[in-house]
Amino acid sequence: MTSFVVVPRSSLEMAVEQGASPVISSVFLADLSHEMENDGVETGRNSPHLSMQSLNELESSEKSGIPLNSAWTLWHDKYVRGATAAEYAANLRKVYTAHTIQSFWSVFNNIPLPSQLDVRTSYHFMRGERKPLWEDKQNVNGGYWKMRCVKHNTDNVWKELLLAAIGEQFNDNVREDDEVCGISISVRERDDIIQIWNANAKAVEDATVLNKVRDLVKDVEFFDDFYKSHQAHDAFEGVRPRPTKPPGFPFAKD
């Protein structure tokens, strides 16, 4: 069980619902954002860059902030058509791994919103320090829900999904042997692409993640939504499980 630093009772009640997997209130997270957004944090313009001042503040936030249930890492990349998994991995840039609510907001408030990014670039917000690669050993058995939204909704959807992820609000929407382990936003010329990664593709039939997304952003209409396992992609470069055969097939010769 995650251990938490001592905070005022009212804040703690808002931040954590007691249990083995604490759920952090989105109200608390949003209120904390307002407290921190003008607290010496520089706003990014066109690329995710953390200033030395922000890094110093982050170091302090990591020591004294309210711990998240698990760390989350923000990655940034630029799309390269036809890149191999190795080339894509080399193109990834790690922005920061946040371990506390305060450090999450310090990063979020210091980087450009998706609407400020260049076309064909992406943010990936991944559980732990896993890379946003299908072939990553922590992702290889999973997949993602993919959907599109119109550009004027992207910034709000991105923020709400991040808050849901760090607050573990998808816990009730996946099986016990599954978890949401990543949120990606890819900026395109017309509509933007959103992906929600999960760890266990075999558990997808019991998942209600898309229902949760629509509940989080009720006024947003998504389209072209579907689920796909990583191993189902033609470009997947990992080791696929060998297909099973009926007992005795091919039949042995007498």
Image (spheres, rainbow, N blue to C red):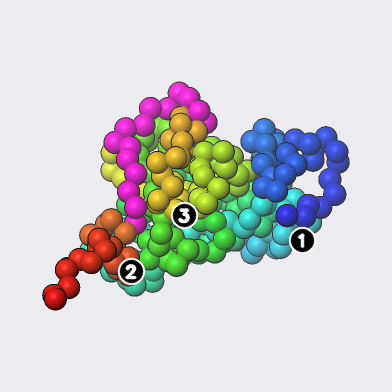
Q: Quadrant of residue 92?
A: bottom left
Q: Amino acid at mark 1?
A: Lys
Give the left or right position of residue 41, taking residue 86 as reference: right
SS at mark 2 in the image: loop
Instruction: Tell which of 183 and 108 is nearer to you.
Output: 183
Q: What residue is shown at x 20% (from left), y 66% (from top)?
A: 249
Magenta range: 215-230
Q: Amino acid at mark 3?
A: Ala
Q: Quadrant of the N terminus?
A: bottom right
Task: Tell me if 186 is positioned left or right of 54 in this view.
Answer: left
Residue, x 45% and y 50% (percent of image)? 198
Observer able to see residue 105: yes
Name the quadrant containing residue 15. Answer: top right
State the image coordinates of residue 90 (x, y, percent, origin top left). Answer: 38, 71
Q: Is residue 228 magenta?
A: yes
Q: CA distance from mark 3 to mark 2?
A: 15 Å
Q: CA distance from mark 3 to mark 1?
A: 29 Å
Decide: is 111 above or below 62.
Answer: above
Sequence-wise first label, 1 or 2: 1
Q: What residue did someone put label 2 on?
A: 238
In the rendered view of the protein, which quadrant contains the C terminus? bottom left
Mark 3, residue position? 199
Amino acid at the residue labelled 2: Gly
- In this figure, which residue is indicated by the disc labeled 1? 63
